[in-house]
Image (cartoon, coloured by chain):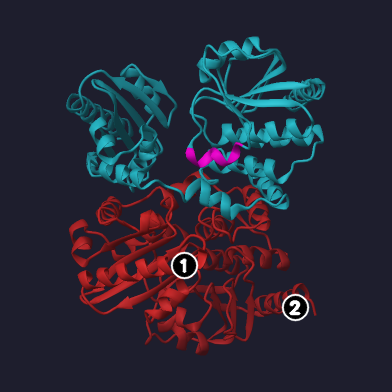
Chain colours: A cyan, B red
Amino acid sequence: MKANEKRNLIMKEIAEAIFAADSLYIFPHMVADGDSMGSCASFCRLMRRMGKTADIMMEDEIADNLKFLDKGYVTFVDENTVVPQRDLCVALDCSNTDRFPKREKMFFSAGKKTICIDHHKTEFNYADINLIEPSAASNTELLYELYEFMGVEIDKEMAEAIYTGIVTDTGNFQYTNTTKKTHIITAELYDLGIDTKQLNIILFQSVRPQKLMLRNTILNTLEMRCDGRASMAYVTLDMYDACDAKTSESDGINATLRDIQGVELAVFLREKHPNEIKVGFRSKDYVDVAEVCLRLGGGGHRHAAGCTIHDNMEAALEIIRNVIDEVMAEYDAKRA
Amino acid sequence: MKANEKRNLIMKEIAEAIFAADSLYIFPHMVADGDSMGSCASFCRLMRRMGKTADIMMEDEIADNLKFLDKGYVTFVDENTVVPQRDLCVALDCSNTDRFPKREKMFFSAGKKTICIDHHKTEFNYADINLIEPSAASNTELLYELYEFMGVEIDKEMAEAIYTGIVTDTGNFQYTNTTKKTHIITAELYDLGIDTKQLNIILFQSVRPQKLMLRNTILNTLEMRCDGRASMAYVTLDMYDACDAKTSESDGINATLRDIQGVELAVFLREKHPNEIKVGFRSKDYVDVAEVCLRLGGGGHRHAAGCTIHDNMEAALEIIRNVIDEVMAEYDAKRA
């Protein structure tokens, strides 16, 4: 059976389960990003419009710039919350159950049937029906196709949630997951009346001044190594405090370090707790940072990986300096 | 006659002039951006492929991240350069002749016929044939339509130049000039084999460390006013020197200041020469900064405008602080 046929069969099975259901719980992953929240909001909107009882179950807060997606859909729960049984539990953008740890028990017990719809490559087929499509740039792109398959109307609210997932998960169409299909679907969203001006103000033009100052403070620690082919920077708990910034507000620094001209390897060290330093590695082209992090007891992907160092920041910086110099020398030797 | 019919007539006239021509000069605007360079590169490539003699004439350097577009197309000239007569002079992305001051004489004298193709709203129909289409998000989007109209093949090199114009002029599809058509055309570029990974590395992931440090230095001057509804920052000649940065590397700071959460009015002061301060104003939603700048002897658009203050930075900062407080108080009074 061709991949496409198999996918259509799964979509058919999901469509039938949805049409048959009267009530559902919907699960985004923890620290939900634009794609997971956009997926859940578009899905919950559709379900309620179809007359079903549907709610999004969350175990942590909604990011400020994504709160507009919650039109009374979200219920906050923890590992002890008991809820009445419903027909379906649907996890969106969750490649594994460790993406919703405090709700895992609920996911498997509160629904007569479980569904997982995700665009991450994964071997965990943890639900009764699993629609996994790694070629989709965002999970909302995949949902758009499911909605088309189901023949349901996509309204403006759903379209804006789908757009949110696409633009946040593709870095505004810049990441390599973006395809021809991503642009075709986005073009169709324009026909559904999406207000891109307001969406972009909410999503990208609402940076907290504290975040800006934190970024500045971090970039003041920028250190270039190996003739400018490596960059590193760090953040301490004191720096978050001094800027009155949230932990999540140092996200994105790794990309900034990698985007420096000539940089192949970028490393960002983050003090999570005293003597617990999270280290994020990024590469632009040829360095396999997954392999580098494996040596340090961590792991990840070719261009994005990480590890943890249990020591103070000064010691961690010294370790990383040596790792950087070593890795770049190895690649130099290979390429010579 | 409908706008569309009129446009097709102009496209027909341009197509005929191009097919009839054996030789051309192509003109981008000075300080050429991705759209102007992308326009000229795609056009020059097509002309040479069609066997015509074609060159891009420039009066200033090509930005580092756009140099890949010049496959031996560019000739540098000044106001005294004399060149042999050709059949056509074609200006791309130049709404007025002041966009190519040192080449204005050449444009009007070196071609038997002149053509202007632009997507900026303009009343200056300075060429013999003027194709002006403000609804196009980028000039390369408009050229894509012209190429389709002409029935010529768009090859990979042209497609990458067109993509460059689109992503740079729409801020990665984020600005409000982006339309359904922009996404449809981009989708079609994927079929032509564009290497979006390499293009995005070149265009967006090649920030000079000097630029990063300049941005940091500037953001250290951030001042919030009016309960966080206004932001301001400045750069002096000394700061450029200290960072070893280019003047152009403070571009984009205004957008960063505007993108702060809650900010409606953002002002950036740049010391161009001693006692000559360029002031850029941006607004997010309701403040008409064109009107504000008019009062200060400047001008611009509703959401982006500027003026010049002939004084030292300290005096200029004091003037701007007062202007900001006054303007915000006026809008508060209006909205009360």
Q: Is residue B92 left or right of residue A228?
A: right
Q: Residues within 10 Å of mark 1 (few under 14, many from 20)?
A: few
Name the kind of residue labelled 2 in the image.
Lys
Across and down, in percent, residue A147 comes to: 75, 34
Q: Residue at 76% across / 25% down in the picture? A: A11
The residue tagged with tag 2: helix, strand or loop?
helix
| Mark 2 on the same chain as mark 1 | yes
Left or right position of A251 against B34: left
Query: Is residue B27 toward the left or the right of residue A189 in the image?
Result: left
Residues shaded magenta: A64-70
Instruction: Please tell me which residue is depicted at 60% across the width and 39% down the height of the picture.
Output: A69
Above or below, comparing residue A172 to residue B299 in the picture: above
Q: Nearer the viewer, residue B288 or B48?
A: B288
Up the image or down, B248 lies above or below B128; here it is above
Query: Within 10 Å of the Cα at label 2, are there few (<14), some (14-19), or many (20+) other Cα atoms?
Result: few
Q: Earlier in the sequence, mark 2 or mark 1?
A: 2
Q: Position of residue B186 (x, y in %)?
A: 62, 53
